[in-house]
Amino acid sequence: MSGKAFKKLDVEIIKKIPIYDCVAIVKNMENMLGKKVIPAGSTCKATWSGDVDVVIQIEHEGKDALWGQLCEKFKHTKRLGSGFSVLYDYAPLGFVQIDIWPSTKAIDDAWSLAGGRMGGFKGRYRNILLGYLAKCKSAETGVKLTFASPGGYGERGKQRVTDPKMILDCLDVPCTPEEATSLEKIVEVLIASGQRDRLIGFDDYLRNPKDHMPEQTERVISYVNAFLLDN
C-alpha cells in the first residue's frame, strides 16, 4: 500500500519506527481489535520500518465488520483497494501509519507478503519471481496459472491455493516455506536442483518502464544472471 495514504492531513507521520515499537504496535492492535494480527513485509523483522504492515484474521463476520471496528477505534482511516490504512496515535512516537490486509487465512497471506531477506532484495522481487514461474508453467501446461500476493496460487477453474507449502509444490520450488521468503533463496534452490533454465527470461519479465525502483531491479537482474553464467 501507499505510504502516502494520509499525505493531505496536517499531521506529522513518523517515518522511522524501531523494531521494538513495531512489535508493541502489533500487540496493541491485537488487544484493541480482539483478533489475530500478524506482521507482514519487513515489519517486526527490519531494524527500522517506515510504516507498520499487518494481516488481520477475519472470520465469518467479513472485512466490513473489521472496517467498522477500525472506524470506531481510529480517527483517520482509509480504504485502499482490498485493504485498509489507519493512523495510530502511538504515544511513545506519534502518528504511525498501519497498512492492513484482512484475510480469512492470515498466516498464509502473511507468507505471501514476506519482506525478503534482511539486507537483501525486497520481498516484491520474490513475489515477481513466483509470478514468473507460474507464467512459465502456464506456457508448459497450457493451463492459466497465476501467483498473487496476497492471494496465493491460482489455476483457472479451481479454488486458489494459499498454503505456502502447497504453493511451492505447485510451482516445483524444492524448499520449505521458511526458506522461500526471499528471491535469493529461491534462485539458489532452483540452481542447486538443476532448474537453472526456469530463470532464463526473468530479466525481460522483470523490466518495466513504470518501475519506480529501476536501480534495484537492475541489481536483481545482475544477481540472477550471475547465477546463470556460473552454472
Image (cartoon, rainbow, N blue to C red):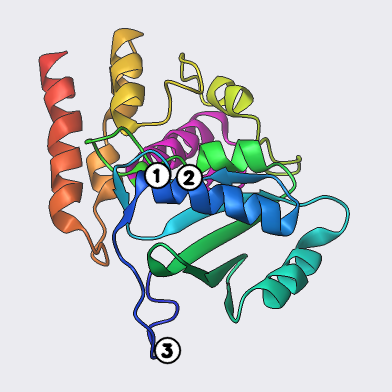
Labelled disc at residue 9: 3
At x 28% / y 27%, what residue is drawn?
A: 184
The Cα–Cα distance between marks 1 and 2, rounded to whole angstroms, is 5 Å
The Cα–Cα distance between marks 3 and 1, rounded to whole angstroms, is 27 Å
**Vertically, is 89 above or below 16?**
below
Tell me the quarter of the picture where residue 75 sits. Answer: bottom right
Q: Amino acid at mark 1?
A: Tyr
- 31 left or right, relative to 180: right
At x 75% / y 47%, what residue is drawn?
A: 104
Q: Return the disc, 2 or 3, that comes first in the chain's sequence.
A: 3
Residues rendered magenta in the picture: 125-152
CB within 8 Å, label 1 to label 2: yes
**Vertically, is 49 above or below 190?**
below
Observer-nearest of 224 and 123: 123
Is 151 within the magenta? yes
Q: Main secondary structure of the magenta part?
A: helix
Q: Which residue is mark 2?
A: 23
- SS at circle 2: helix
CB within 8 Å, label 3 to label 1: no
**Vertically, is 170 above or below 120?**
above
Observer-nearest of 93 and 220: 93
Mark 3, other Cα within 10 Å: few <14 / some 14–19 / many ≥20: few
Labelled disc at residue 20: 1
